[in-house]
Amino acid sequence: MKVQIKTSFKKILFLLLFFAAPGFSYTNIIDPSNKGDSITTDIPFVHIDKGLISAIKSQQGLLIKEQYEWLQVWQNHVGKKNNLNNLPPAINFNQFMVIAIFGGQRNCDSVKVEKITDNGTNLIVHVKVSSNSIPRPGNNDISPYDFVKLPKISKTAVFQTE
């Protein structure tokens, strides 16, 4: 009986120390949408650019893990107005990656990455689309976008619109 108590105490102490460690910034949450005890982890991210006009007119979400991909996506995003003032924000792709969301050409106020979670298999990117309920004439040029930077993780991304 003593062995079992010592083992349980060691496990609890390890978990307390592990999750209370300085610099640990992820939050573990039981995912209520799953039937089992699946644990998801919130992934911290930072918005690096967001707006209403992108040259990319199709609705899509991209996971960018390499510098050459970033340069190509940014060049497609800025389109013909590409000049020295439209260089992409600097990203250290050894440590970080970028998620790009394009809302497509639509009557939409914005797209925004609300939350990113790791479900153990994939990164789940929760995207909020804010639509204008009143049609605005002449808004064919609106194509909202959002770029976020997050720690580099070796997983694929699944995009969910909310």
Image: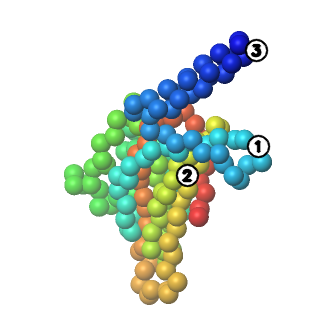
The image shows residue 36 at horizontal and vertical percentages of 76, 43
**From the viewer's perspective, is residue 53 above or below residue 49?**
below
Query: Callout 2: 10 Å neighbours few (<14), some, many (20+)?
Result: many
| Mark-to-mark CA distance, 2 and 3 | 46 Å
Mark 3: which amino acid?
A: Met
Residue under label 1, please give it: 36
**Residue beneath label 2, please?**
125
Q: Which residue corresponds to the image point at 77% horizontal and 48% vertical from the top-left?
A: 35
**Kind of residue at disc 1:** Gly
Q: Residue at x 56, y 56 (%)?
A: 126
**Residue type at tag 2:** Val
Comparing labels 2 and 3, the label whose residue is closer to the camera? 3
> Image point 55% across, 51% down: which residue?
125
- Marks 3 and 2: in contact by CB < 8 Å? no
Q: Residue furthest front?
A: 2
Does the image show residue 19? Answer: yes
Front label number (1 vs 2) = 1
Residue 137: percent from the left, percent from the top?
A: 44, 87
User: Which label sits in the foreground, 1 or 3?
Assistant: 3
**Residue drawn at point x = 60 percent, y = 26 percent:** 12
Query: Position of 4 compared to 118: left or right?
Result: right
Quarter of the image that includes the N terminus: top right
How far apart marks 1 and 3 lie (CA) works out to 30 Å
Extreme residue in the top direction: 3
Image quarter hosting the C terminus: bottom right
Q: Secondary structure at mark 3?
A: loop
Alpha carbons under labels 1 and 2: distance apart: 21 Å
Residue designated by label 3: 1
Q: Nearer the viewer, residue 9 or 152?
A: 9
Is 121 in front, or is 35? 35
Which type of secondary structure does the marked residue at label 1 adopt? Answer: loop
